[in-house]
Image (tube, grey):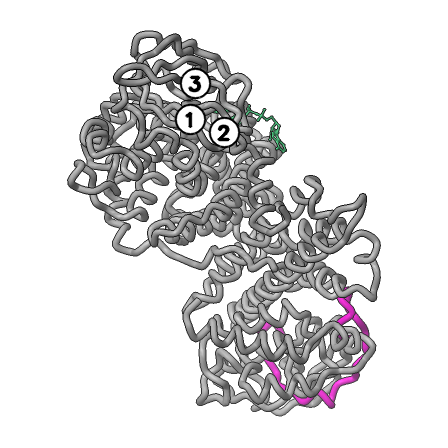
């Protein structure tokens, strides 16, 4: 029978408030960006480098690789502060959240030595290469493939929707390295492909908002040396699946519309009508509960658990919330709409369709929740 | 929740599992009050949790009482448990000893005149007919007072709320002793509202958890087109939404249970959030159950009718949303993000 999900109350330890203050002070001094709390909305290599200098990239990684050896909850505080401030996190976000932890877990010793220091110093930026023109939700259907050649692999195919590939240095690319068998999940590997390698072409794609944020990548007989295969060849699927709870449960899954809410509140102050105050209260109530749920998961992760279903659940709930915020705030704007609010709202409306697609669509997440409920 | 709360919750759950099945709930609606179950709860100290032993309570925290109330919500326990715990909280906050027997708090258009006469009528008092003590909120002139009166002194017209639970109209015309009346401030009346909202929040959370388990169970059992309806993606997607709402409700409710001092802002968040979930989930539960769920015979109605009643009691979503919004907007100590992180 269905046993319920694990969102036991957990709190960020009080001693993390000093770190929070430090991050806020750093961000207050950094003013040369246009704030947007969608993690995909802004990218600045300079910002990421200054941020790294504070020791806040790879802060949970072991000290022997140059990491900070700090807790996952400390990282939680840092990342949520970044998003709430609307900082341009796009360059380092994926490397810090995903690529580094992947290498730590599955990479060879030489790979950890070779790749982690650049991430930690805010100089190497990573993209995720999973989706393809004919492969979205059904990730096991990828066709990008590689054949073994002396010293490595020869890679051909194409990836698409690759966020920030035009700014980044490496792309962790899921590739078929053996023909599909009965078990579709076998025969895949992940390669660390330098985006500027011979045979790699990056073609920008404008998103709906008219920004260049994602790309299509073409691999044309790209040589990938053996030491750029993450861990062992053939282990790609397990690698991809292992990090889902990290990817899906963080504050970026419910804070994308935060600027809209914050600007809405600033515009109301004490003049709120009944319906404005009500809407504001409703949206804050959702936000507070989402954050508490997300912190509950962060505590499970800190304790070494992998709550995949809970992570899918909070991403779905958080994404739905992010989509709701602009839809309803627009109906209750004050008579004089301040510029900051108007702009945040416009940007959010244009970005909103991506919230329930990227990182696993709403329908796929709900399918995972249904599995957790024992329905399938 | 701490270990003690886990144990309290398990104890309450066992007791209710054994003695508060669907038949008991149905019988109660027909007027067969489960007094043996009430006695069991009394004997185990569950009706006075969160009240100092020195005042005749069972000790523990208000959060402990909420833990039990979630279980009562899960089982749709047709007893004045929340009412008695709420009145007990009020008495203990006035440093008064608890009387024995079920109690309820009564608030409406009631005045206390110079000669000590309590007068007025109050509509829809939950479980009043089963209570032995009434704590009546009245006005002496403009000033709020609480009067402690034996239930037998009041004319009761029996009624039901939409959950089918006793909801009675009271006509008061009672001479009260001065020592049975306590002057209070408006903040105390607000505290009662907050406690009541906290109680209904956790009861809804319990009912929602139960309704989800029941609906998942039904979807796995019910077959159409040659397979369990759980296998249809349309059903799976609805139940996933149900689960997200329940998870949020549980989290919001447990926040209240683990607090050493109940914070009204967290109650506002819980009541607004869980009240919203109640409507969404009741709709899905009934959709997935089909026609059988639309009958009085099926136990789903024990939960969904209570969800619909409880979301309106002690302030509905709109009330708490607006109150929360105004509180935050008026607070000049920090911006929204500082407020959110300070809430933890
Ligand atoms: C802003 C943005 C950034 C992105 N960045 C990256 C990136 O950096 N790297 C990367 O690899 N990818 C990236 N993606 C791609 C993202 O992972 C895919 O969009 C996602 O996996 C869905 O794939 P798709 O878009 O091809 O949709 P499809 O899988 O074709 O789905 C289309 C619709 O069908 C539904 N559907 C599909 N299968 C099922 C099913 N079994 N049951 C029910 N419904 C189903 C989907 O939910 C969706 O509604 C990005 C996407 C966006 C929008």
Q: Which residues are magenta?
A: B140-168
Q: Can residue A157 be seen by looking at this rendering?
A: yes
> Quick check: marks 3 and 1 in contact, CB under 8 Å?
no
Query: Foreground residue, B314 or B284?
Result: B284
Of tags 3 and 1, which is closer to the observer?
3
Chain of residue at mark 3: A
Q: Can residue B329 be seen by looking at this rendering?
A: no
Residue on which the image places disc 3? A145
Residue on which the image places disc 1? A40
**Same chain for marks 2 and 3?**
yes
Q: Earlier in the sequence, mark 3 or mark 1?
A: 1
Mark 2 close to ligand 1, CB under 8 Å? yes
| Left or right: B144 as drawn, with respect to A12 | right
Alpha carbon separation for disc pair 3 and 1: 28 Å
Alpha carbon separation for disc pair 2 and 3: 23 Å
Which quarter of the rendered image does ligand 1 occupy? top right
Q: Earlier in the sequence, mark 1 or mark 2?
A: 1
SS class of the residue under badge 2? loop
> Quick check: marks 1 and 2 in contact, CB under 8 Å?
yes
Mark 1 close to ligand 1, CB under 8 Å? yes
x, y percent for residue B8:
50, 76
């Amino acid at each position: 029978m269905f046993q319920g999900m694990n969102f036991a109350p957990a709190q960020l330890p009080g001693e993390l408030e000093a770190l929070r203050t430090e991050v806020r002070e750093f961000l207050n001094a950094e003013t040369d960006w246009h704030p947007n709390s969608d993690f995909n909305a802004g990218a600045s290599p300079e910002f990421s480098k200054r941020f790294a200098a504070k020791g806040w990239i790879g802060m949970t990684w072991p000290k022997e690789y140059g990491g900070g050896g700090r807790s996952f909850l400390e990282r939680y505080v840092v990342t949520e502060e970044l998003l709430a401030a609307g900082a341009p996190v796009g360059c380092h976000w994926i490397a810090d959240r995903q690529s580094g932890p992947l290498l730590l877990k599955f990479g060879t010793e030489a790979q950890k030595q070779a790749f982690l220091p650049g991430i930690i110093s805010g100089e190497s930026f990573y993209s995720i290469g999973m989706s393809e023109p004919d492969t979205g939700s059904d990730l096991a259907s990828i066709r990008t493939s590689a054949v073994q050649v002396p010293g490595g692999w020869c890679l051909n195919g194409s990836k698409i929707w690759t966020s920030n590939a035009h700014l980044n240095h490496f792309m962790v690319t899921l590739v078929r390295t053996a023909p599909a068998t009965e078990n579709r999940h076998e025969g895949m590997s992940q390669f660390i492909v330098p985006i500027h390698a011979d045979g790699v072409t990056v073609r920008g794609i404008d998103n709906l908002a008219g920004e260049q944020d994602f790309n299509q990548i073409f691999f044309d007989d790209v040589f990938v040396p053996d030491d750029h295969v993450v861990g062992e060849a053939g282990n790609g699927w397990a690698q991809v699946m292992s990090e889902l709870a990290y990817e899906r449960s963080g504050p970026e899954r419910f804070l994308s519309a935060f600027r809209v809410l914050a600007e809405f509140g600033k515009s109301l102050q004490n003049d709120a009508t009944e319906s404005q105050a009500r809407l504001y209260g409703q949206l804050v109530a959702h936000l507070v509960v989402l954050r508490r749920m997300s912190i509950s998961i962060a505590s499970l992760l800190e304790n070494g658990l992998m709550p995949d279903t809970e992570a899918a659940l909070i991403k779905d709930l958080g994404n739905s919330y992010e989509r709701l915020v602009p839809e309803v705030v627009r109906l209750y704007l004050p008579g004089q709409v301040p510029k900051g609010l108007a702009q945040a709202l416009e940007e959010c409306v244009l970005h909103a369709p991506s919230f329930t697609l990227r990182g696993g669509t709403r329908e796929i997440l709900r399918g995972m929740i249904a599995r957790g409920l024992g329905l399938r | 929740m701490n270990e003690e709360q886990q144990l309290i919750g398990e104890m309450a759950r066992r007791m209710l599992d054994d003695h508060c099945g669907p038949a008991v709930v149905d019988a109660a609606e027909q007027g067969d009050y489960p007094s043996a179950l009430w006695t069991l709860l009394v004997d185990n100290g569950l009706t006075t949790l969160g009240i100092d032993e020195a005042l005749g309570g069972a000790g523990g925290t208000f959060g402990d009482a909420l833990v039990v109330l979630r279980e009562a919500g899960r089982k749709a326990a047709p007893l004045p448990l929340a009412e008695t715990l709420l009145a007990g909280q009020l008495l203990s906050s006035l440093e008064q000893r608890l009387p024995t027997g079920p109690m309820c708090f009564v608030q409406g258009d009631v005045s206390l005149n110079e000669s000590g006469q309590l007068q007025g009528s109050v509509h829809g008092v939950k479980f009043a007919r089963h209570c032995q003590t009434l704590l009546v909120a009245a006005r002496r002139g403009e000033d709020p007072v609480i009067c402690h009166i034996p239930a037998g002194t009041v004319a009761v017209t029996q009624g039901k709320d939409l959950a089918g639970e006793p909801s009675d109209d009271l006509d008061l015309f009672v001479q009260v002793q001065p020592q049975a009346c306590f002057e209070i401030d408006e903040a105390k009346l607000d505290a009662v509202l907050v406690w009541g909202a906290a109680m209904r929040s956790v009861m809804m959370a319990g009912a929602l958890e139960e309704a989800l388990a029941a609906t998942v169970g039904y979807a796995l059992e019910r077959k159409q087109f040659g397979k369990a309806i759980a296998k249809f993606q349309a059903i799976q997607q609805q139940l996933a939404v149900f689960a997200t709402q329940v998870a949020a409700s549980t989290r919001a409710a447990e926040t209240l249970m683990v607090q050493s001092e109940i914070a009204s802002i967290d109650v506002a968040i819980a009541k607004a959030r869980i009240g919203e979930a109640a409507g969404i989930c009741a709709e899905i539960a009934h959709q997935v159950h089909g026609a059988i769920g639309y009958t009085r015979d099926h136990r789903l109605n024990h939960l969904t009718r209570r969800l619909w009643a409880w979301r309106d009691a002690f302030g509905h979503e709109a009330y708490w949303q607006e109150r929360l919004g105004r509180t935050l907007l008026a607070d000049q100590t920090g911006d929204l993000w500082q407020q959110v992180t300070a809430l933890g």
